[in-house]
Image (cartoon, rainbow, N blue to C red):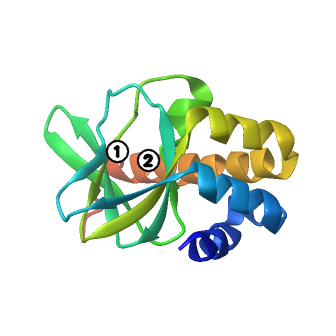
């Protein structure tokens, strides 16, 4: 099991630069979690205390709005979710809900922050990931605000 988790972590872009012995320590310090379809990994507004690496399955990233819940992304194997809350020390900005049976590694805030301090490449990759998400979200918001074009 531990070797499977180390292999999975090596495939996650933000952890790709970390040597296998350090990944083994990280995998050992993580909690392996199983979620059923429809179960929340965390909810928007909750205080963040961990990030999650999806090992298998899929989940929706959902934000609450005045008109109800809005799915803004679907994530799957090797995705990292929940890192923004623990990096910025802010409440969760979205709910992540399993859309199938899902297994994930739960990385505590302390371990995650230690990784970013010890491995600058991890911090750089996290920034790249967050900027990409922000860019996609901004493009979606612009598209949603544009008036429909006549046919």
Checking the image for residue 103, the label placed there is none
For mark 1, give the secondary structure: helix
* Image position, residue 29 (x, y; %): 60, 49
Residue placed at 25% from the left, 49% from the top?
Answer: 40
Residue pushed farthest left? Answer: 67
Find disc 1 in the rendering and name its residue: 145
Q: Is residue 97 above or below residue 74?
A: above
Foreground of the two, 10 or 21: 21
- The alpha-carbon separation of the residues under discs 1 and 2 comes to 5 Å
Task: Tell me whether circle 1 and circle 2 mark residues in contact (CB < 8 Å).
Answer: yes
Q: In this view, does 29 lie above or below 59?
A: above
* Quarter-of-image position of residue 116: top right
Image position of 102 (left or right of 85)? left
Residue placed at 50% from the left, 32% from the top?
Answer: 85
* Image position, residue 141 (x, y; %): 40, 46
* Image position, residue 68 (x, y; %): 14, 40
Image position of 98 (left or right of 23)? left
Find disc 2 in the rendering and name its residue: 142
Residue placed at 69% from the left, 35% from the top?
Answer: 113
For mark 2, give the secondary structure: helix
User: Crowdedness of circle 1 by 10 Å Cα count: few (<14), some, many (20+)?
Assistant: few
* Image position, residue 23 (x, y; %): 73, 61
Foreground of the two, 31 or 126: 31
Image position of 97 (left or right of 24)? left
Query: Does any portion of residue 17 appear in the rendered image?
Result: no
Foreground of the two, 28 or 59: 28
């Amino acid at each position: 099991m531990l070797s499977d988790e180390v292999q999975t972590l090596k495939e996650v872009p933000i952890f790709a630069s970390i040597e296998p012995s350090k990944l083994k320590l990280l995998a050992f310090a993580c909690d392996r979690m199983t979620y059923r379809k429809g179960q929340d990994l965390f909810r928007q507004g909750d205080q963040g205390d961990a990030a999650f690496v999806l090992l298998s399955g899929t989940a929706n990233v959902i934000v609450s709005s005045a008109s109800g819940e809005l799915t803004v992304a679907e994530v799957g194997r090797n995705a990292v979710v929940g890192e923004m809350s623990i990096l910025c020390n802010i409440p969760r900005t979205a709910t992540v809900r399993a859309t199938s049976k899902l297994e994930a590694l739960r990385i505590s805030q302390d371990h995650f922050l230690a990784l970013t301090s010890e491995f600058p490449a991890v911090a750089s990759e996290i920034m790249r990931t967050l900027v990409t998400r922000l860019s996609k979200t901004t493009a979606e918001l612009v598209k949603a605000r544009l008036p429909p074009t006549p046919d």
